[in-house]
Image: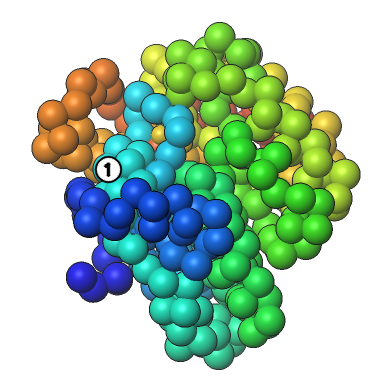
C-alpha cells in the first residue's frame, strides 16, 4: 500500500491484520505507527512548506469531523519507524530550503505518542522543524522533556464552555486547557486552529471566550479560523455513520470575518 495519499482519501481496515499483541507493543514502543496518509508540499500545516503524516486513531467524536475514518487506529497503514525516518531523510534538504518541516496530524497523533516522539526525535536530529497538530486532550502523555522535541503545537480549540465542548466532541476540555498552560509555561509556541461551523461554533460570545483564553496564554503566535466545509461528507455516508451536519453550509464571509475580528480584538494575530 502506497503511503502517499490525501487525508481526504477514505481508508479502512488497513491495519486490521496486525495481531492485538503487536498492536499493543507498537503503542508501547512506538516502533510501529498506524498512518492514515502522508502528504508533501503543504503550506497550511505550520511554517514553510511541509510534509504531513496523518495518523490513525482519535478519541474524540466531533460531529463535524471531516476524517471519521481516522477514528479507528486499525484503519491506518502499519508503518515501521525506520520507514517513517527514511521518508524524512528523503525530504529533509528540501524542507530546510523551504523553511518548512514535518507536521504530524491525525486523527489525534497523541493516541500514538511513542511513535510521534520517536519520529520527532529523528527529525530533530536531522535539523527538521517539528509540529504537532493535536486536539490536546492527551497532552499529559508527554513529559516535560518531550515538549522540547516539538517546535510548534497546532492546537485545536473547539469551545470553552465545557457542556458545549462535550456536545461538539464527546469529551471534556479541561485536559486541553491544562496542556495549553503547560506549553505556555515551557515557552513552546502554539498556533490555534478554530473550526467555524454555522449553528455549532459561531456564537460570538463563545468565540470571545476562546480568544480571551488564547490571549491569556502568552505563547499563541497565531489563530487560524477554518471555515467548515463538506469535503468529509462522503466518508460519513460510505461508513454508514449518522452525519448530523448533512445540511450545514460553510459560514458566510461576513461571519468568518467577524470571528477573525474577535480574535484580533483580543490582541491575537488571526487569519
Ligand atoms: S479531534 Fe479531529 S480527528 Fe478527532 S474527531 Fe475531532 S475533528 Fe475528527
**Left or right: where does residue 63 sit relative to residue 193?**
left
Tell me if residue 87 comes above or below residue 37 in the rendering.
below
Mark 1, other Cα within 10 Å: few <14 / some 14–19 / many ≥20: many
Q: Residue at x 35, y 24 (%)?
A: 63
Give residue 215's position: percent from left, percent from top. Answer: 78, 34
Count of picture labels: 1
Query: Measuring 41% from the left and 72% from the top, which residue is drawn there?
Result: 80
Above/below status of 30 relative to 143:
below
Q: Is residue 233 visible?
A: yes
In this view, the residue farthest toward the front is 21
Q: What residue sits right under mark 1 in the picture?
A: 69
Q: Is residue 251 left or right of residue 171?
A: left
Residue furthest right in the image: 185
68 vs 96, nearest the viewer: 68
| Residue at 62% over, 23% down | 173
Q: Is residue 186 above or below residue 202?
A: below
Using the rendered view, name the quadrant where residue 127 is placed. Answer: bottom right
Where does the N terminus fall, quadrant-wise?
Answer: bottom left
Residue 55 lies in quadrant = bottom left
Ligand 1 image position (quadrant): top left
Q: Is residue 215 something that shows in the picture? A: no
- What colouring does the structure picture have? rainbow
Residue 38 placement (x, y as % from top left):
36, 66
SS of the residue under disc 1 = helix
The residue located at (54%, 28%) in the rendering is 158
User: Which percent across, then down, holds residue 154?
Assistant: 60, 49
Q: As drawn, is 107 to the left or to the right of 12?
A: right
Residue 224: x, y in percent? 56, 44
Tell me the quadrant of the picture where the C terminus can be found. top right
Amino acid at each position: 500500500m502506497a503511503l502517499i495519499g490525501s487525508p481526504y482519501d477514505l481508508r479502512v481496515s488497513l491495519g486490521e491484520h496486525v495481531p492485538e499483541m503487536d498492536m499493543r507493543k507498537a503503542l508501547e514502543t512506538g516502533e510501529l505507527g498506524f498512518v492514515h496518509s502522508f502528504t508533501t508540499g503543504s503550506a497550511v500545516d505550520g511554517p514553510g512548506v511541509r510534509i504531513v503524516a496523518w495518523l490513525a486513531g482519535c478519541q474524540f467524536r466531533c460531529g463535524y469531523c471531516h476524517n471519521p475514518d481516522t477514528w479507528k487506529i486499525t484503519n491506518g497503514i502499519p508503518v515501521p519507524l525506520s520507514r517513517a525516518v527514511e521518508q524524512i531523510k528523503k525530504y529533509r534538504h528540501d524542507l530546510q530550503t523551504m523553511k518548512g518541516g514535518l507536521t504530524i496530524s491525525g486523527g489525534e497523533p497523541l493516541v500514538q505518542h511513542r511513535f510521534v516522539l520517536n519520529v520527532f526525535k529523528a527529525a530533530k536530529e536531522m535539523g527538521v522543524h517539528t509540529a504537532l497538530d493535536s486536539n490536546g486532550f492527551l497532552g499529559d502523555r508527554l513529559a516535560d522533556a518531550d515538549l522540547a522535541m516539538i517546535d510548534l503545537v497546532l492546537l485545536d480549540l473547539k469551545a470553552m464552555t465545557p457542556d458545549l465542548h462535550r456536545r461538539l466532541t464527546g469529551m471534556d476540555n479541561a485536559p486541553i486547557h491544562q496542556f495549553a498552560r503547560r506549553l505556555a509555561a515551557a515557552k513552546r509556541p502554539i498556533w490555534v486552529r478554530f473550526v467555524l461551523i454555522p449553528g455549532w461554533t459561531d456564537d460570538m460570545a463563545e468565540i470571545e471566550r476562546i480568544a480571551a483564553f488564547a490571549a491569556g496564554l502568552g505563547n499563541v503566535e497565531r489563530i487560524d479560523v477554518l471555515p467548515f466545509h463538506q469535503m468529509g461528507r462522503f466518508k460519513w455516508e460510505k461508513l454508514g455513520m449518522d452525519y448530523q451536519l448533512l445540511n450545514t453550509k460553510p459560514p458566510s464571509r461576513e461571519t468568518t470575518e467577524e470571528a477573525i475580528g474577535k480574535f484580533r480584538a483580543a490582541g491575537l494575530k488571526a487569519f
